[in-house]
Amino acid sequence: MNAQSDPAPKREGITPDALLHTGAGGDVTAEDLVLASGRDINPKNMAWAERRLAEDGPAAIDKLLP
């Protein structure tokens, strides 16, 4: 082992909880919601996102993400 090696092994494909956040504490745009849902940005999806934001506010993005 050298002095720069990590003490804990890295597991690929797993994101640490400390890095998971939605940012719902700030402004969430319709574009943010479309991208978080994995959809393409187009007029139909933007209209869907705008309806979701109108109904749920910024918490709409929290409902999409684990």
Image: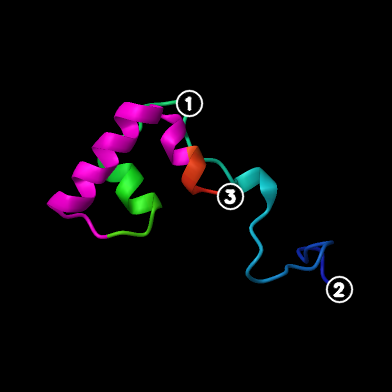
> The N terminus is located in which quarter?
bottom right
Mark toward the viewer: 3 or 1: 3
Determine the image quadrant of residue 33: top left
The disc placed on residue 25 is: 1
Question: Residue, x 30% and y 28% (percent of image)?
Answer: 54
List x then y, in percent, for residue 28.
Answer: 35, 33
Say how the picture is coloured: rainbow
Which one is in front in this view, the residue at disc 1 or the one at disc 2? Answer: 1
Tell me the number on the disc at residue 4: none
Ranked by sequence position, the earlier of labels 1 and 2 is 2
Amino acid type for the residue under numbered disc 1: Gly
**Mark 3 neighbour density, 10 Å: few (under 14) some (14–19) many (20 or more):** few
Q: Is residue 63 left or right of residue 48?
A: right
Which residue: 66% across, 44% down?
A: 18
Q: Residue at x 25, y 36 (%)?
A: 50
Q: Residue at x 52, y 48 (%)?
A: 65
Dot placed on the residue nearer the N-terminal end, 3 or 1: 1
Instruction: Give the answer, above or below, for where 19 lies relative to 39.
Output: above
Is residue 48 inside the magenta stretch?
Answer: yes
Secondary element under disc 3, as helix, strand or loop, is: loop
Q: Which residue is mark 2?
A: 1
Span of residues in magenta:
40-61
In the rendered image, residue 56 lying in the magenta stretch gets the answer: yes
CA separation in Å, label 1 and label 2: 42 Å
Direction from residue 41 to residue 11 in the image, left or right: right
Which sits in the foreground, 56 or 37?
56
Nearest the eye: 49 or 2: 49
